[in-house]
Image (cartoon, helix red, strand yellow):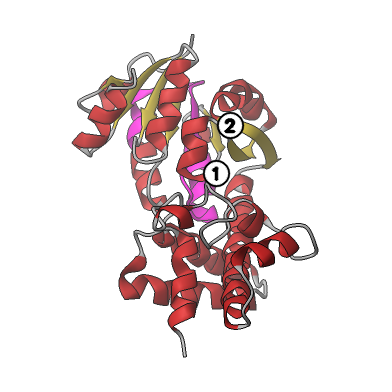
Amino acid sequence: MTRIAFIGLGNMGGPMAANLVKAGHDVVGFDLVHDALKAAEATGVKAANVLTEALVDAEIVITMLPKGQHVLTVWTDILRSVPKGTLLIDSSTIDVESARNAHAMAGDAGCLSLDAPVSGGTGGAAAGTLTFMVGGSQESFASAKQLLEVMGKKIVHCGDAGAGQAAKICNNMILGISMIGVCEAFVLGEKLGLSHQALFDVASTSSGQCWSINTYCPVPGPVPTSPANSDYKPGFMAALMLKDLRLAQEAALSSGASTPLGAEAAQLYALFEKLGNGSRDFSAIIEMFREAR
């Protein structure tokens, strides 16, 4: 049994912490949102009233926070309270520069660290089937791998500090672009008189197949578990897709990479959010294409 402090118990962090409890670990959680803290407590997570309370005797600290600035602020506070040798894992999706700065802070304090963002949405978090994209030293990765396997089914060591975040934003740029392409194809198919099932049966088994069709089809029917069957209740909110696409564009600008489709995807999701759809699933963007003239 490992003593774990889990900071950030929202839609992703809450179920991840719950799976650690199910595996027999001693998990103390903290979140600024009272409802999130109470929900985690109901799954067996011990609730801390303040951050420092969660850190008492923690061997590993996991953070799941909205932005890079939040991670750097919280890690600054954490590193004041934990002893040398403590392992810090950040599973937030943030910019690569902030991730590297967090690693540097941990190293200066004599602590091990990983950036370990995830893919798989809230369903994967609850089922323990997330993919972890991990950046950091081999020593840190070896220390964390068994624990990450409790929360995910695929754990990939992508390289040194910041490599996990780099892999995450590249992956989600692919996802954002591919979902737009799939949505456009289904809207075109509708205009041409194709049924959703017919197009799915062709595209899901031929050269058009991709996760956005086979697993997350944006129209109701062909994939019963996709959000399209529940009025686009989010597995992955459009606002979060926009966040990741913007992170990819920031990285492209700083590295000199050419990503014209990524840039267009970011603009389309920005428009979709502006129309009031940020809290819906990102696959609901198909409705914007239906309405376009």
Q: Which mark is residue 137?
A: none
Mark closest to the chain's N terminus, 2 or 1: 1
Q: Quadrant of residue 18?
A: top left
Above or below: residue 152 compared with residue 287: above
Count numbered badges in the picture. Answer: 2
**In the structure shown, which secondary structural element does the residue marked by tag 1 occupy?**
loop
Above or below: residue 258 compared with residue 24: below
Q: Please name whichever residue, 188 or 118, is drawn nearer the observer in this view of the structure.
A: 188
Task: Please state if 62 lies on the left or on the right of 100 as rendered.
Answer: left
Q: Amino acid at mark 1?
A: Gly
Q: Tell me the residue at 62%/37% (across/down).
A: 136
- Pinpoint residue 14: horizontal percent, then vertical percent: 37, 33
Query: Residue furthest toward the bottom?
Result: 293
Circle 1 sits on which residue? 120
- Pinpoint residue 67: horizontal percent, then vertical percent: 39, 52
Q: Which mark is residue 152?
A: 2
Q: Please name whichever residue, 281 or 159, is drawn nearer the observer in this view of the structure.
A: 281
Q: Tell me the residue at 58%/51% (across/down).
A: 223
Say if the magenta span includes residue 102: yes
Q: Which residues are magenta?
A: 77-105
The local crowd at label 2, few if under 14, some if 14 to 19, many if 20 or more residues have their Cα within 10 Å, is many
Q: Please name whichever residue, 193 or 230, is drawn nearer the observer in this view of the structure.
A: 193
